[in-house]
Amino acid sequence: DSFPGCDKLIVDGQEITTNDDETAKTDGSSDRKKYRVKVIENHGQDKIKVEATSYPFPPSYNGNDIRFTPVQVNAIRSGLSPGLTTIIGPPGTGKTDVAVQIIANLYHSFPTQRTVIVTHSNAALNDIFTKVMTRGDVDERYMLRLGSGERNLTTTSTSDHDFTKTGRVAHILSRRGDLLEKVQRLSESLGVSGKSERGVNGAPSYTCETSEYFYFHHVKKRVDVFEEAAVAAAKKKEGDDPSADIFDIFPFKKYFSGFDNYDTSASLSLDEARGKIDEIKSIFEELAEYRPIELLRSQRQRTDYLLTKQARIVAMTCTHAAIARSHLVKLGFHYDNILMEEAGQMLDVETFVPLLLQRGESDDSSGAHSRLKRVCLIGDHNQLPPVVKNQAFSKFSRYDQSLFARLVRLGVPSIELNKQGRARPDIARLYSWRYDDLGDLDHVSTREVFTQANTGLKHTFQLINVEEFEGQGESTPTAYFYQNVGEAEYAVALFQYMVLLGYPPEKISILTTYNGQKDLLLDILSQRCGQGTPLAGVNPGAVSTVDQYQGQQNDYIILSLVRTKAVGHVRDIRRLVVAASRARLGLYVFCRQSLFCNCHELRRTMDQFADRPSKLQLVKGEHFPTKRMVGGNVPGRNLHEVNDVTELGALVHSMQQDVANQG
């Protein structure tokens, strides 16, 4: 399925039929494998042949646990090919996972090349960086994060060090100490040195330089003797198992745990012995990479060496790329591949600068050319564009058009991902009409979390009409600082109601379209969920504006549109697409229905909201998680329709009193 047009699939030299492929999908007993894939095009008439060679999948690696769609596979293949790749990723289509797979494939396929990752925001960069680290097949010593956003970076790495330049140097020095300790133990197990030769406090007596001498004079010599003896032992046995003899001649028995005080019946296969020898060799290979760090004394020299020589995956934001460009060029920084996420949010110049972080190989001649081989732009021109506050530049100069959107508009070949796996199908329909052929992955219709209804709420998405609260709709305490007290109180009350039913508060985010409303929401939350209240210390997963929340998601989204006199900047359908596509399981919008439903630009989405009641409908007697299914019948006695924010506030107060009495 991953290779449309494939008429012949050969795995490890054997041709696989359709039936064999289906059996492999459902056979849970088969071992997990990694494959080197070769695609031979023009095989026959408009057909392709795929040859896959498997190799062991290390049990310590998480790897990729996502089954890519054919379009995603095509995007990954294109990202590995030289030249420009443009990938359009609608919400929830896995563009970040595609980017991570491209990065991992480049890392393994081209060991001598360096890849630069660039995003518009620190949040998106940290998301990519974390997913690359979670895979486990990219050695963390080759990862480097530039800029200040790494303070919020949390990974599953076993290291406690950060991924800045100074943090990576500290990690390398710590790792160097651990490896030299292994070299010292190996030396002692071979009788080359004794414990009395250790340094102060038992520190290893070896350095990276002396450990290299030790390897060539003592380790390599013993390995060569062992290989010759192993071949002789295999010939002597003539088909019998030579494991006992291999164990006897293995030179590193004392070094590996479990070999001390061994009995005479112990055995070791030749493959196991070679595996242990490879483990020893890897120690010295890694120490050889750390030798320059040992020789360089100043922190600046060490960090510059790490950046220009060792790091193979370097991550930064487009802003940091502009700040650091002159320093990187001066250092002689070079890279072969660049991948840009959120390319649709970058200005033209923000896209160009990361392409110029290195000098050409012949920079002073007319034949100058760059070492850059692959440029991969990933984004979505149907979501928010770059932010340009100057209206003249934005409207008349089209300065708010990203290079990514410009390339798509000019017809540059691009790949559009076409299957979303984030949201319920009915929520996805709110924005899928903006894309040519956006469908749903199977799991959004079959997994329990998507088929279950939202506890205590009749609908999975709903637009709730909010009339004037205490005689007031929108207000502007200062110019362009829009607030709406009624919507803010309603949104916070719904959040309290959901938390009291048992929803995890971190799974709920409250979004709005204006900074003024965000500040008002935070003020009300500090009062309703502050000290001395039954919900003290309970906070939603995020309180943010729609623009700042692009690229993120949550299970349940409560959205306030604020305006009651004019539609405002939500008239840009791209902003509504972002707002509606942040939710996975539930979306509840508070606004003035008569205003937004009559906006021509928003009609395709608002008509779907208008098919449902404009008053919030609750289901009584439920507690999270509910067993009710989406679309299931709700008895009339259990259905409660909320008329206004005052009624919902009274209901929440009653529920809080019950919680206090039970406590």
Image (cartoon, grey):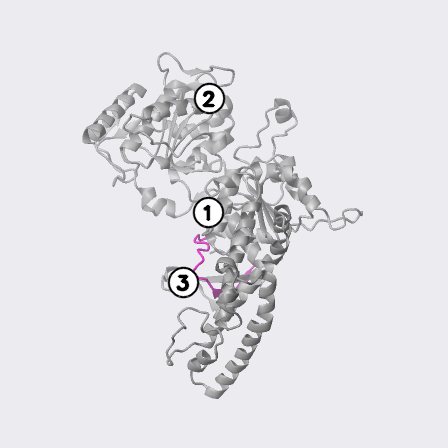
Which of the two labelled residues, at mark 2 and mark 3, occupies the earlier sequence position?
Answer: 3
Q: Secondary structure at mark 2?
A: helix
Residue 469 to residue 22: above or below: above
Mark number, residue 345: none
From the image, state whether disc 2 or disc 3 is nearer to you: 2
Residue drawn at x 19%, y 31% is 662
User: From this viewpoint, is residue 39 visible?
Assistant: no
Q: Nearer the viewer, residue 624 or 662?
A: 662
Instruction: Give residue 221's quadrant in the image.
Output: bottom right
Q: What amino acid type should be assigned to the residue bearing mark 3?
A: Ala
Residue type, numbered disc 1: Thr
Q: Secondary structure at mark 3?
A: helix
Q: CA distance from mark 2 to mark 1?
A: 34 Å
Q: How many marks?
A: 3
The residue indicated by pointer 3 is: 24
Circles 2, 3 touching at the beta carbon (< 8 Å): no
Q: Earlier in the sequence, mark 2 or mark 1?
A: 1
Instruction: Inspect the image, locate mark 2, and give the three-letter code of the amino acid beneath it.
Output: Gly
Above-or-below relation of 556 to 465: below
Q: Is residue 419 magenta?
A: no
Q: Which residue is mark 2?
A: 516
- Callout 3: 10 Å neighbours few (<14), some, many (20+)? few
Q: Residues within 10 Å of mark 1 (few under 14, many from 20)?
A: some
User: Which residue bears the numbered disc 1?
Assistant: 155
Please identify, in this view, whether the residue under mark 3 or under mark 1 is nearer the observer.
1
Tell me: 428 left or right of 397.
left
Residue 132, x across and y down, in percent: 50, 50
Indicate whether residue 64 is drawn in magenta. Answer: yes
